[in-house]
Image (cartoon, rainbow, N blue to C red):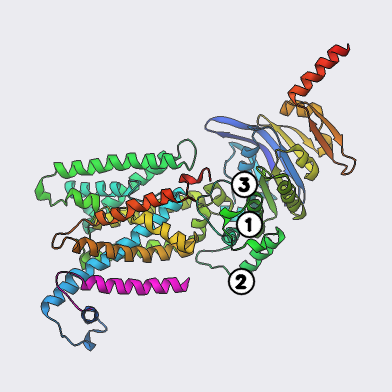
Amino acid sequence: MNLNVENITVGLENKTILHNVSLTVRSGEFVGLIGPNGSGKSTLLKSIYRVLKPYSGLISLDDDNVYQLSARQNAQRMAVVRQESSVEFDFTVMEIVMMGRSPHKRLFQTDTTADSRICEESLERVGMQAYAERSFFSLSGGEKQRVLIARALVQQAEFLVLDEPTNHLDVRYQLQVMDLVKTLGITVFSSLHDLNIAAMYCDRLYVIRDGELVASGTPDEVLEPGLIRDVFGVETEVITHPRTGKKHVYFFSEALRNEQSRQEVKAL
Amino acid sequence: MPFIIVALLIGLLVSITFAVTLGSVEIKPATVWKIALSNLPLTNQWIEVDWSKGEQTIIWDIRFPRVLLGAVVGAGLSVVGVAIQSLVRNSLADPYILGVSSGASAGATLVILFGAFSMYGQFALSFGAFTGALVSILLIFTLSRIGGQNSTVRLLMAGIAISAILSAITSLIIFSAPNEHGIRSVLFWMSGSLAGGKWEYLTIPTLIVVICLIVLLAQYRSLNAMLMGEESAGTLGVNTVQFRKLLLVITALLTGVIVSISGAIGFVGLMMPHIVRVIVGSDHRRVLPVSALLGAIFLIWADVIARLAFAPEELPIGIITALCGGPFFIWLMLRSSYSFGGSGR
């Protein structure tokens, strides 16, 4: 399933947040969106998953304008894993995952054994089958994220939107969640705050700053110190890791940089 | 799950039976059902009359409608509690705490005083209460959403403010009304009473409660999804704009109809869904029917206490529900797992 975003301008309360943004995610691709806090990453994702309607421009999945599809039709095509918001009501893991079947259900239609099987399979794929009857509250951050991914799988959508899926997770769970998403084999568009995670997993990257896309391409093309300095305002050194062949970004702290320049002055 | 429903149905039947027997005149449970069956069209020819005319009047004309009204009002209040909690995604919501009941009271008293909506005939009172409830829930909902969604503090502040204003307006209307308008007392509108239970007043509330319960049950998936947050619900295929409107109307309709017949009875809509969630979890397919049945049983017994505790004087039923509800609120606060609004968990 192809996502096409054409010249969208999005705003909130008379303030324009995204200016004229266009991007494409082709079937089967894993595309990342990187940019500093407040650059408009979440806003862009929200307009894609129909929470913030753009003032102008078009967002389409294959040939359908997402804003002309019903919520139900849209949920059959696109699943979303949002940053885990505080949920006050406790559900079991199975109940949460079963919610993913909603877009395939009519009024009064009850859960069938087929639905249960789909849910169990999805839980198995994310390695959470043993947790089906556990309370969602009792899970760790990584486990919650995996359950929400299972729910997205149960929607049987071909297109997956992830909003900073590794936020607040320990390193081990960050990798686990990303490995999992990578193996799903569906089209993914994800915002990411960790450049090295982006480099490791994404086929292509879009870079956003102040509501405008400033660069796009493969991680190899995009991740270079000049651009990172421009967009994130930090000094880096980017090398290609010998074992993975992927770009790796090293960050330099302000203090270290100051120290170095003083030494350079002394050396002169 | 079916076991809980069956157990609660039996409990409801037993509660109705005993609630009807209890009162200043002692009557045997068997007589209760003989009288009941003798008044139903299909079974009346099989029943032999072995009771006095007085017993017939007390049971059939006075106690039965009152107890059944208690069941309907209790079920309705619990269901509206579930609906409103899903609407604002906050388990502290309840039509009484948020001031929706006060809105209904204000609407109802205005109807009585000025004869507004007289074109609706006998439905005028319900319609007035519905309008009042709708206005207040819309106000609270809008106010609580300004600047950042889902803030418990905002919601409760809006609720307290609206509730205080509308209660004051209701009192003002009642005090300024000349007595000949037959307006019911402040106590009735603030604390509620089932004393007005008559067969002819039962039909509308029963129908509305049953219809709303069925409509909500049909939408149980959407209700569940709403608890995950409105935006998440949207991504799960819920048309949130429409669904929110449906919930607003159902909340106002149930509150309006119930308040116009029984006044503003507090805390039932808060307590029942909470207790039920502890027992059966958050899935609305279970929460809705179990809340309705438990609420019905609870209010029947609350009314029995209200009638008998200081007999022949009658307590406003709101005193009983508040005596249960207040400590319940404190218990909620002290529960270690509970943090208001879910922050800082």
Name the residue furthest right: A242
Can residue B245 be seen from the camera position used here? no
Point 47% across, 45% down: residue: B341
* Mark 2 belongs to chain: A
Point 66% across, 42% down: residue: A167
Which residue, given by chain and number where applicable, does mark 3 sit on? A82
Task: Confirm or deny contact between disc 1 and disc 3 (CB under 8 A).
Answer: no
Q: Is residue B225 above or below residue A232?
A: below
Crowd band around label 3 with a 10 angstrom C-alpha radius: few (<14), some (14–19), many (20+): many
Q: Position of residue B337 (x, y in %)?
A: 49, 51
Asked if residue A95 lies left or right of residue B318, the reply is right
Point 87% across, 44% down: residue: A244
Task: Confirm or deny contact between disc 2 and disc 1 (CB under 8 A).
Answer: no
Q: Position of residue B192 (x, y in %)?
A: 24, 54
Say which mark, if any, is on residue B164: none
Q: What residue type is labelled 1?
A: Arg
Where does the magenta region start and end?
A: B1-28
Whole-angstrom CA distance, mark 2 to mark 1, is 17 Å
Secondary structure beneath dot 3 equals loop
Q: Where is residue B283 in the image (x, y as percent from the top left)?
A: 50, 61
Q: Main secondary structure of the magenta part?
A: helix
Asked if residue B189 lies left or right of residue A196, the reply is left
Which residue, given by chain and number where applicable, does mark 2 sit on? A113
Whole-angstrom CA distance, mark 2 to mark 3, is 28 Å
Say which mark, if any, is on residue A151: 1
Q: Nearer the viewer, residue B287 or B26?
A: B26
Can residue A155 be seen from the camera position used here? yes
